[in-house]
Image (cartoon, grey):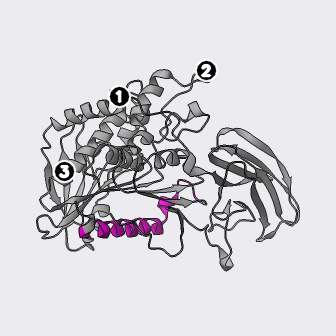
Amino acid sequence: MKTIRYPSSSCLQRNGIFLLPLLVGVMGHVQAASSWDGKTPVEYVVSVETDKPDAIYHKGDTVTFNIQLLHNQQPATEGTVDWVITKDSVVPPIAKGTATLTDGKATVTGKLDEPGFLRCDVTFKQDKTTFTAPAAAAIDPTEIKPSMPTPDDFDAFWAEKKKELAAVPINAVITPVPPPPDRPGVETFAVQADCVGKPISGYYARPAGAKPKSCPALLMVEGAGVLSTDLLSPTRWGQKGFLALDINAHGIPNGQPKEFYAALNNGELKDYRIHGRESRDTYYFLGMYLRVIRALDFLATQPEWDGHTLFIEGGSQGGAQAIAGAGLDPRVSFIFAAYPAGCDHTGMVAGRIAGWPKVVPMGADGKPDPAVLQASRYFDGVNFASRIKAPAFFWIGFLDKVAPPTCSYAAYNNIPGKKQIINDPSHGHDKGDDPKFWTRIAEITIAEQKAQATPAASP
């Protein structure tokens, strides 16, 4: 396998870690994370950034957070801001206080004596309006370890579940659907295939007239929520020469009126993230992850598949599914996980944050529910990650409170093979709103596909 080279010249690479520059604002200055959305006119803007552009430090380093308050785009002549510095954004404050601004600026400092993330949240109040801005610093992030070890019978448990799945015939039903009118050269289909429990349900695209054994394959898995999957996503990849399948997370019909999904979201799938969490045999994500394997089965049985290039990509909950799919299925030859959820469910036992789906409840005694804690370990991305054989690419946001970077790094660091990560210091869980984000993912995916298409990369 050739090493992937990220194509954008705007990134710096250090030891397999990509460092995205902070957002560039007006006049070419670096823009910190701020209270302003960059669009709506506002009188006050508060911002905060770390003193190092890459926001990466070592244990015991002093991290300086530079705060700025602008009034009508000029440094505020007076004022104060409140600040709180925490570990992982929620673990009890390391420090807090009020800073007096001089020429619109102030600095506060903090440190962390263990691998993790240090976060500074700044608040400015003007009359009845509150302006907030965060910044975060990574402290030796490549040294973050899973909060608990992999259960001894983790592989045996999943081997049995995969055996149960293998006993269910795929029985794929492929129904032609019209492609988007501006997307020529692609054949598109609605797909359902049997699984343990609910079926897989998605949209599938392939290049028109594709020859046998000629196409790489890509599975896309969806983020949280109860929604239809999108026909356009696989269609785009079909135009790029891929067999592309996009499945929803729940095995529900696609293309229905929004009221259909709202009823499910408020009914049987309400709070699905914690359904059956008391047992590893009943937890909702068991069926979800088995559907991922069944979707890979579908792609691997298509006559047009080249027989070796099988990618899986997803963000947030989709990132969790991608990590699970790659850890459970050795056919996967590349994984891209953006802002992955579902990692380090048991973070609280190590005095750290646990990310979405926040499956483990805390009791009145401040301790995690023991049954749920144990069950969650069989669905934890950190444990799937240690089984991944394929090259892996992660993208994380330092300000992410949904899929916290501490949790993502715990999984990333547990991957034994080739891996690369993009650090995005200035974003939280919102990067998916940026079209350039998806363009960059496509560039990375195509670069990897080309690398795997070379004779040296072939099995």
Secondary structure predominantly adopted by residues drawn in magenta = helix
Q: Residue at x 43, y 34 (%)?
A: 150
Can residue 437 be found in the magenta stretch? yes
Q: Is residue 180 visible?
A: no
**Badge 3: few (under 14), some or many (20 or more) residues near its Cα, within 10 Å?**
some
| In-image side of 232 versus 415 (left or right) | left
Mark toward the viewer: 1 or 2:
1
Q: Are marks 3 and 2 in contact (CB under 8 Å)?
A: no
Q: Residue at x 68, y 61 (%)?
A: 34
**Which residue is disc 3 drawn over?**
298
Which range of residues does the magenta coloring cover? 427-455
Q: Quadrant of residue 232?
A: bottom left
Q: How many marks?
A: 3
Q: Amino acid at mark 2?
A: Ala
**Which residue is disc 2 drawn over?**
364
**Sequence order check, earlier mark of 1 and 3:** 1
**Sequence order check, earlier mark of 1 and 2:** 1
- Residue 220 position in % (x across, y down): 32, 55
Rendered image: mark on residue 414: none
